[in-house]
Amino acid sequence: MQAADRQFLDAVELWEWATRRGMAVSRRLLDDLHQRAEAPWSLATLIGTGGIVRDVPGTSREAVLQAVVAALTLPDEVDRAFLLEVLEAREALGSTGIGDGIAIPHVRNPIVLHLDRPLVMIALLRQPVGFAAPDGRPVTTLVTIIAPNIPTHLAILGRLALVLRDADLRRLLSDRAAADDIIRRIDMIEHRETGAFRIPEAP
């Protein structure tokens, strides 16, 4: 069990490294993650459920993360203070900023939260905040991932790596477009880019 956990955590590090650098992800790896993920939903559906929150306050990375945790739709039993701690701990290991004003804060080991389904929320910040992103640009959009297990976490992270390469989606996020327009664009990219790898809708 411990060896398997170490293998998954190494994979998390690889995905984060590739995502921050805008690197293309092998379709074979995506297929493998898709097969291992236990609760497959489309990214558009996950964001439709998790929400797109506007005017999120904060002038520092810590303050923004605190506002994001407060805005997340989570079960009552989830300890938000603990979630904030692990998100901050993840940032201390290395920025989740990927460039173009976007960061993907997430729990490094998602099993500690004991959730039964994944959650993805987009937060559009009230003002740009420094996140030590590789391109040096401040962040205006946070895409927060909360997953019930590591395979699902990896599948979602890989899907985000695909859709966030789309210039039109990045423009919609930067322009704070209507939620329906953002979700519609994500859904279109999933159809176009992933084809047979598209995560099916949740029942």
Image (tube, rainbow, N blue to C red):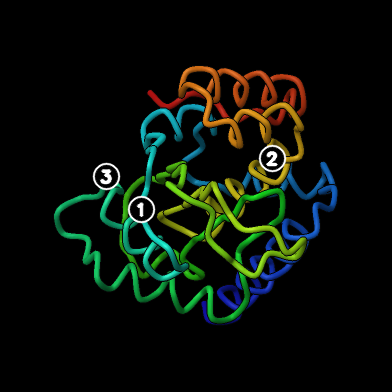
- How far apart marks 1 and 3 lie (CA) works out to 17 Å
Circle 1 or circle 2, nearest the eye: 1
**Residue projecting furthest to the left:** 76
Q: Which amino acid does label 2 sit on?
A: Leu
Q: Around disc 3, counting alpha carbons within 10 Å, would you say few (fewer than 14), some (14 to 19), or many (20 or more)?
A: few
Residues at marks 3 and 2, CA–CA distance in whole angstroms: 23 Å
Is 150 placed left or right of 33 in the picture?
left
Q: What element carries label 3?
A: loop
Which quarter shows the C terminus?
top left
Instruction: Give the residue at x 60% y 22%.
Output: 187
According to the picture, the residue beneath numbered tag 1 turns out to be 57
As displayed, is residue 110 above or below residue 156? below
| Amino acid carrying mark 1 in the image | Pro
Q: Where is residue 49 in the image (x, y as percent from the top left)?
A: 36, 32
Name the residue type under label 3. Thr
**Contact check, label 1 and label 3, Cβ < 8 Å:** no
* Residue 60: image location, x then y, percent: 45, 68
In this rendered view, identify the residue nearer to me: 52 or 33.
52
Quadrant in the picture for residue 10: bottom right
Which residue is label 3 attached to?
A: 73
Mark 1, secondary structure of its residue: loop
Q: Which of 145 and 166 is in front in this view?
A: 166
Q: Which residue is identified by label 2?
A: 164
Residue 98, quarter of picture: bottom right
